[in-house]
């Protein structure tokens, strides 16, 4: 979980984004904790995974190395497929755009 990006080049996240990233980093190794997403963040599971993908698509999300970022992207995309969302070309692509492009 190391990040070699100089502090002045890191993109700042708000407290909610930090909480989402901390949650996914903690639980992805255990298959997620989907039953806690709605009470913790007030959003559905697919929306949570879409938002985490958007965070991960940022070039300088704080505290992530390339390997961890790739693992989290892979995990989020797999979770979205479980919820019936199509596989997407880019982490930031919405479901509607993915459907139009498929």
Image (cartoon, rainbow, N blue to C red):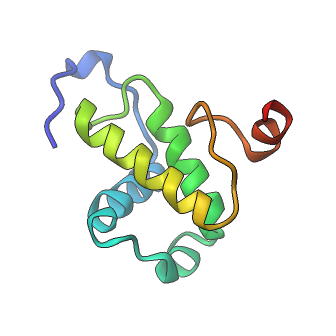
Vertical order, 2 against 83 (above or below): above
- Residue 31 image offset from top left, x and y in percent: 36, 71
Q: Nearer the viewer, residue 75 or 62?
A: 75
In the drawing, does residue 85 fall left or right of residue 71? right
Vertical order, 12 against 35 (above or below): above
Instruction: Please tell me which residue is depicted at 51% across the width and 83% down the height of the picture.
Output: 35
Quadrant assignment, res 56: top left
In the drawing, does residue 91 fall left or right of residue 86? left
Instruction: Please tell me which residue is depicted at 32% across the width and 24% down the height of the picture.
Output: 10
Q: Nearer the viewer, residue 15 or 81?
A: 81
**Quadrant where the N terminus is found in the figure:** top left
- Residue 98 image offset from top left, x and y in percent: 75, 38
Instruction: Please tell me which residue is depicted at 38% across the width and 53% down the height of the picture.
Output: 21
Quadrant assignment, res 49: bottom right
Res. 5 in view: yes
Instruction: Please tell me which residue is depicted at 36% across the width and 63% down the height of the picture.
Output: 23
- Residue 66 image offset from top left, x and y in percent: 26, 30
Q: Residue furthest front?
A: 102
Res. 63 in view: no
In the drawing, does residue 30 fall left or right of residue 49? left
């Amino acid at each position: 979980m190391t990040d070699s990006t100089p502090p002045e080049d890191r993109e700042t996240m708000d407290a909610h984004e930090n909480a989402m990233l901390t949650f996914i980093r903690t639980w992805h190794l255990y298959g997620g904790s989907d039953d806690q997403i709605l009470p913790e963040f007030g959003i559905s599971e697919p929306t949570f995974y879409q938002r985490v993908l958007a965070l991960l698509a940022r070039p300088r999300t704080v505290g992530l190395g390339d390997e961890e970022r790739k693992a989290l992207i892979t995990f989020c995309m797999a979770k979205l497929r479980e919820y019936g969302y199509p596989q997407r070309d880019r982490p930031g692509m919405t479901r509607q755009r993915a459907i139009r492009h498929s």
